[in-house]
Image (cartoon, coloured by chain):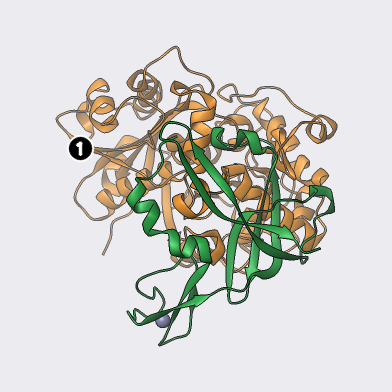
Chain colours: A orange, B green
């Protein structure tokens, strides 16, 4: 029998171009905020997990460097990797350490410094995140290229337009403008988005998440420990996870991500969510909008909309506050930024704040069901994690 | 960008030049890129199958931002092509992006893929072009 696990402290650094700090200094911004939030210190933590993709940054052993700087050593820390879902993998690992009974208080830290390498190097490194020899080396397929294949297939089949995609960017920039930690703090218009240059047709610059430095940290605790630490624990009700094929040519279709569908099903079953109508359970969601098309596919993979009808949710404004399910009220990957290893951890931090009703003015969801969902994808559906949080255990 | 070592590259070449896939003798599944063991049923009994030279464009995209090795080829059109029993990803050449359509017939063309400046390697491989 596994134990219940709660989030008892969260912290997020300022996201953006953070060449002003080193990797451990950046991590500490988030770690310190999480400690202050939980009124705990490094001595209270029994273990830690660092989500960091690396490659573009100089630290080869980030878990030790970050852990030592944050005062966590000699407690054991490891680094985990699951591409753009690395942060969720860190949360999952920390969750299992507590659920299994091995530890009572564990910290998950996500940190990424993508700006340590020049942009073309980062673009090439991310481009390898498919099937290296057969897709990248020989053809030059870039990461936006993968999602562009999904966008063309989706638009062709269901009649969504480039304008619909841009509406996702407009929403997420709007909420980013209300989030002081977001990389982009400026609202944009549909016209600005439509007029931005093509990166991989039909995806444009404004359809894409940026290159970001950032960190996030969450402190997880067992039920007994959580009750002593805080009056408002936020429970991890379920984590669903799955992988998909690394090879594009093996995918059955290009209108959804199988790994995300499997992960959602698993999480819904564990948390007792009705898979036919999940939105009735949730007050707010964070989804993986690395590109605008990815957010629309997420609506469908998670069952927020029927297959082929996800674009109507954004067209009708149903994923703003007041709609059927508010999505990415922190600006999402699109405007908050996407520091690979930190993204999944920052989703859990954001939803914890949302459920505790501590988000900034104008971007706080109405909390009535007391449940929230995070959807984090690695690669182009190579990994998927769906994490469900709730105010009751 | 680092390239794979020459021996590894050469080892991949039969499939790469002739578009040879592998068919599982037990369950019939066809794999491209080729595999040594069937991921579906676990069988080690697989045979080579040469893919047809002509197929159908399933999806495509036009890359305006490309890795440095491909700067001279910009914009790069990449497509997923159904070649008989397998789907193959490759560049679409001799084509105007605005005239391409999903479902259109394309054929295999052999072209220079990458020139590795440091080692002087010129790598050739398959691409696709619209059928006249
Ligand atoms: Zn088989």
Asked if residue A183 can be seen in this view, the reply is yes
Q: Nearer the viewer, residue B61 or B115?
A: B115
Residue at 54 percent of width and 36 percent of height: B69
Indicate left or right for A257 with A300 as reference.
left
Quadrant in which the C terminus of chain A appears: bottom left
Tell me which image quadrant ligand 1 sits in.
bottom left
Chain under disc 1: A
Q: Secondary structure at mark 1?
A: loop
Q: Position of residue A118 (x, y in %)?
A: 50, 23
The reply to whether residue A11 is in sight is no
Closer to the camera, A143 or A319? A143
How far from the left and from the top, in percent, is residue A389? 47, 49
In the image, A7 versus A334, the foreground residue is A334
Q: Relative to B94, does residue A259 appear above or below in the rendering?
A: below
The image quarter containing residue A357 is top right
Residue at 43 percent across and 55 percent down: it is: A237
| Residue at the extreme bottom of the image, as rendered | B26
Query: Which residue does the numbered mark 1 point to in the structure image?
Result: A46
């Amino acid at each position: 029998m596994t134990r219940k696990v709660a989030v008892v402290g969260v912290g997020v650094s300022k996201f953006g171009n953070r060449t002003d700090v080193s990797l451990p200094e950046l991590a500490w911004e988030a770690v310190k905020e999480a400690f202050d939030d939980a009124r705990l210190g490094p001595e209270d933590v029994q273990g830690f997990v660092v989500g960091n993709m690396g490659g573009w940054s100089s630290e080869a052993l980030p878990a030790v460097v970050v852990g030592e700087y944050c005062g966590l050593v000699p407690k054991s820390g490891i680094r985990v990797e699951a591409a753009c879902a690395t942060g969720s993998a860190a949360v999952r690992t920390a969750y299992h350490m507590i659920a299994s009974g091995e530890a009572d208080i564990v910290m998950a830290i996500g940190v990424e410094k993508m700006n340590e390498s020049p942009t073309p190097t980062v673009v090439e490194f991310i481009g390898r995140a498919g099937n290296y020899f057969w897709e990248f080396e020989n053809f030059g397929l870039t990461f936006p290229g993968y999602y562009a294949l999904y966008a063309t297939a989706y638009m062709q089949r269901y009649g969504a337009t480039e304008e619909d995609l841009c509406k996702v960017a407009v929403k997420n920039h709007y909420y980013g403008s209300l989030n002081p930690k977001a990389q982009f703090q400026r609202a944009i218009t549909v016209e600005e988005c439509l007029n931005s240059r093509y990166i991989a047709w039909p995806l444009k610059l404004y359809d894409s998440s940026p290159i970001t430095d950032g960190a996030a940290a969450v402190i997880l605790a067992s039920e007994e420990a959580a009750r002593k630490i805080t009056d408002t624990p936020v429970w991890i009700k379920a984590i669903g996870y799955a992988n998909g094929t690394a090879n594009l040519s093996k995918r059955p279709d290009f209108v959804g991500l199988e790994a995300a569908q499997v992960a959602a099903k698993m999480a819904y079953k564990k948390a007792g969510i009705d898979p036919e109508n999940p939105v009735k359970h949730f007050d707010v969601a964070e989804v993986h909008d690395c590109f605008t098309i990815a957010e629309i596919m997420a609506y469908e993979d998670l069952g927020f909309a029927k297959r082929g009808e996800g674009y109507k949710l954004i067209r009708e404004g149903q994923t703003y506050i007041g709609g059927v399910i508010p999505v990415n009220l922190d600006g999402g990957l699109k405007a908050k930024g996407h520091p690979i290893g930190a993204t999944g951890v920052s989703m859990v931090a954001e939803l914890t704040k949302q459920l505790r009703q501590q988000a900034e003015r104008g971007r706080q969801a109405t909390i009535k069901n007391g449940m929230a969902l995070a959807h984090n994808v690695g690669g182009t559906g190579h990994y998927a994690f769906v994490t469900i949080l709730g105010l009751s255990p | 960008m680092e390239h794979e070592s020459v021996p590894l590259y050469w080892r991949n070449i039969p499939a790469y030049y002739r578009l040879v896939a592998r068919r599982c003798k037990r369950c019939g599944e066809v794999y491209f890129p080729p595999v040594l063991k069937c991921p579906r049923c676990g069988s080690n009994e697989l045979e080579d199958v040469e893919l047809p030279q002509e197929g159908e464009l399933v999806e495509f995209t036009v890359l305006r931002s490309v890795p440095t090795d491909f700067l001279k080829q910009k914009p790069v059109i990449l497509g997923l092509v159904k070649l008989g029993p397998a789907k193959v990803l490759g560049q679409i050449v001799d084509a105007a992006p605005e005239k391409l359509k999903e479902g259109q017939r394309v054929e295999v063309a052999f072209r220079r893929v990458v020139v590795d400046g440091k080692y002087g390697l010129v790598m050739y491989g398959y691409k696709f072009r619209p059928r006249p």
